[in-house]
Amino acid sequence: MALAAARRLLLHAGSRLGRREAVDGARRFANKRVLVETEGPAVMKLRNPPVNSLSLECLTEFTISLEKLENDKSIRGVILTSECPGIFSAGLDLLEMYGRNPAHYAEYWKNVQELWLRLYTSNMILVSAINGASPAGGCLLALCCDYRVMADNPKYTIGLNESLLGIVAPFWFKDMYVNTIGHREAERALQLGTLFSPAEALKVGVVDEVVPEDQVHSKARSVMTKWLAIPDHSRQLTKNMMRKATADNLIKQREADIQNFTSFISKDSIQKSLHMYLEKLKQKKG
Ligand SMILES: CCCCCCC/C=C/C(=O)SCCNC(=O)CCNC(=O)[C@H](O)C(C)(C)COP(=O)(O)OP(=O)(O)OC[C@H]1O[C@@H](n2cnc3c(N)ncnc32)[C@H](O)[C@@H]1OP(=O)(O)O
């Protein structure tokens, strides 16, 4: 209830801010964790430092920004990227899934589902400019896009690495992976929790193009120009034809999926795995 009210407040604040900045001539709107520029091809930048983890607030702001863009009929495509140096997104926020209560887990998961459904079924052209590490939920964001351009930096990796954390990617993450890289590659990568280098990601089809780091944004823009040349109605109907079954698979069992997540993540053994993983992240800093 409190979260729904917060969402309404954010939406209201977001649109006020959007109007004010538009009056200033800069065609952009922003909330704290997502900046959207609508001058030229629209660009959505995640800015939730240090690692663009998808906290509940970040998910909410992301979903609201997307909703606003969808409602603006002059926007036909969006480039998704990051403002955090070296990180596209570290994925779901582990602190939303660790040490909380079942009601929180349920609320969090509902918002993860919501963002995924909106992104995956968006009528807009989505191109990701992957300018940093992109594990798990970060990879999920990229996979929702129609085209993925990744920076050629071997330090950046991408993939659904959930099994390394002792957790399991849900069926709709898996479905999208299979749709993108095929059953055999997905089966292997999901079990191993593979984080692909840019070259490997290109080979296996996780990304569509790898370019020098300083060209990621210009390449994403030129890809967008090419896609914008296609008539919207035929492209949208085709996208819908390709993606509807996968989205419907979640839509028809959203509540059961929330229950499943909540009971899975609440288990002592899973909480212990997450604790160990968080400790490992801390120790890495040393
Ligand atoms: C039936 C359903 C089952 C459940 C399904 C759940 C599906 C889950 C999907 C997910 O997305 S889980 C998240 C997976 N993400 C990761 O494994 C990434 C972990 N992070 C990293 O590997 C690294 O942080 C990085 C992204 C490569 C960046 O490395 P860098 O050296 O630049 O920064 P760090 O020092 O490691 O991190 C800084 C700071 O941020 C914290 N942090 C990192 N990732 C997360 C995260 N995903 N959530 C929350 N916090 C994160 C990290 O602990 C550091 O914190 P401090 O020590 O500074 O407090």
Image (tube, grey):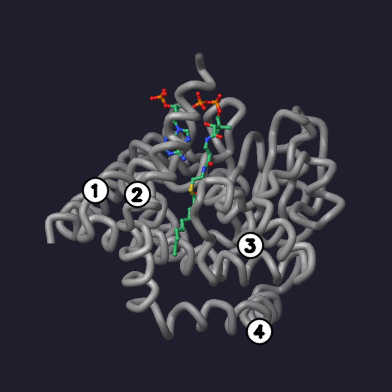
Q: CB atoms at circles 2 and 1 under 8 Å apart?
A: yes
Query: Mark 3: few, some, or many residues within 10 Å (few <14, many ≥20)?
Result: many
Q: Position of residue 210 (x, y in %)?
A: 81, 42
Between marks 4 and 2, how big is the CA–CA gap?
A: 34 Å
Q: Check disc 1 and give the amino acid type.
A: Arg
Q: Earlier in the sequence, mark 4 or mark 1?
A: 1
| Foreground disc of the pair 3, 2 | 2
Query: Mark 4: few, some, or many residues within 10 Å (few <14, many ≥20)?
Result: few
Between marks 4 and 1, how big is the CA–CA gap?
A: 39 Å
| Residue beneath disc 4 | 241
65, 130: nearer the viewer: 130
Between marks 3 and 1, how big is the CA–CA gap?
A: 36 Å
What number is the disc on residue 28?
Answer: none
Q: Check disc 4 and give the amino acid type.
A: Met
| Foreground disc of the pair 4, 3 | 4
Q: Earlier in the sequence, mark 3 or mark 1?
A: 1
Q: Is residue 33 above or below residue 76?
A: above
Name which residue lies at 46% across and 64% down: 70
Looking at the rendered structure, the secondary structure element under dot 3 is strand
| Ligand 1 lies under 8 Å from the Cβ of mark 2 | yes
